[in-house]
Image (cartoon, rainbow, N blue to C red):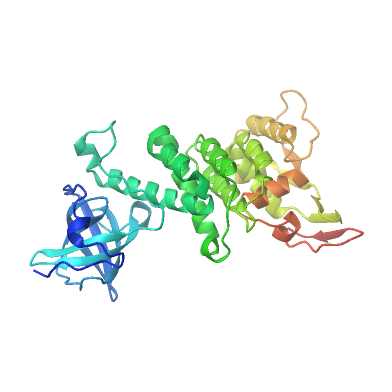
Amino acid sequence: MNSTSPHSDGSFASERRRAERRNSPSLAAYHWKGSSLRQNTVRDISATGAFLVTQERWEPGEIVAISLQRSGPLAKEHSFSVQARAVRWDDHGVAVTFVLPPGADLRLWQSPLKSAAEQNEPEDILREFRVAQAISFLSRVAPETSQSVGRLLHEELSNYRLENAVEIALNAEKMLGASVQVDHLQALPHVVMRILESGSWSSDDKWMLQFWAGLLAASCTTTGGDESSLAFIDLLSQLKALHLRILAAACTKATKLVTGPGLISTRPLNWKAADLMKFSGSHDLIKLDRELNYMSEVGVIAPREKSAFFQQMTDTTVTPTGLGLELYARCNGHRGTAQGFYGVPVTLSGAIALEG
């Protein structure tokens, strides 16, 4: 067996192995060797590392990218990728420690609401890895939230809200990419907490969670003092996925007009009933008529001429307002002006039209 070796931080493998290890028979670790994907059994795992049953013999200190998921064909959407540092090997496989991002707070086997067997399931283990990554990201963009975010995600949210909050954070991290480190982007703590708390109530709909993630990404600036997202948090909380599908289609397709510095509007879109059903994902025209009226009430589209009582809508006009245009831009992670997002030239006078 290979001897224990020191880590870059001066700790030793024997110290790292003190964290409680458990078996998770259905958990597997995958790694690429050249163009070949290798699947290895995870003999045991802890919050600091794991022992992989494998034919590989990585040298102590070697870093390997592995993906953890339930045994079976590798599925990106059901796996979690993590860097692992080899510690030692023997005739059965390799012991590794996890190289987690700064601020990650990985907690395994600590839920008071679940049995030991439940916490050993791959899905439960991967959820904790996702939570740890979300905490790391949020702690980097809003360091003052480190404790409150950890408390929120580890202790305060139901499983349903937890999944949503983590999805929002990880999607925002993807949107920002390397700019978090390169540009040192930060957000105000109370803005971050409001987005997580409000967004976690969303229905389990990718549209909603992606919009909340975009708003979180847009709240991260180089100065770290932008409070302008607060108004959009309140606005987004009043909308449903159907509203956002309509808004997205309208903002994308409408002709944009600049009528002055920082002022942007659109020409009305004339939609047939079939267009509206396609963009919204709903075939209930009475409901759609009602929802369009609601969207105008909250201010994201202009008021329309209302249909006669109980008359089924056959066509309609949809006109995103300046507020609706800015909401859509921010919910796509845009941190500049709405004009910049839509590619509309800035002008000091007159009007410029840009086809959607």
* Furthest residue in direction bottom, as rendered: 34
Residue at 54% across, 59% down: 176
Residue 277, visible in the rendered structure: no
Residue in the foreground of this view, choosing between 344 and 129? 129
Residue at 79% across, 47% down: 268
Q: Is residue 52 left or right of residue 82?
A: left
* Furthest residue in direction front, as rendered: 10
Q: Is residue 251 left or right of residue 114?
A: right
In the rendered view, tell whether residue 277 sits above or below residue 48. Answer: above
Residue 69, visible in the rendered structure: yes
Q: Is residue 320 left or right of residue 108?
A: right
Q: Within the image, what quadrant is residue 237 found in?
A: top right
Position of residue 63 measured from the top left corner of the image (x, y, whole percent)? 29, 69
Residue in the foreground of this view, choosing between 321 and 150? 150
Position of residue 208 measured from the top left corner of the image (x, y, whole percent)? 55, 42
Residue at 46% across, 51% down: 170
Image quadrant occupied by the N terminus? bottom left
Position of residue 94 measured from the top left corner of the image (x, y, whole percent)? 16, 65
Image quadrant occupied by the C terminus? bottom right
Residue in the foreground of this view, choosing between 198 and 228? 228
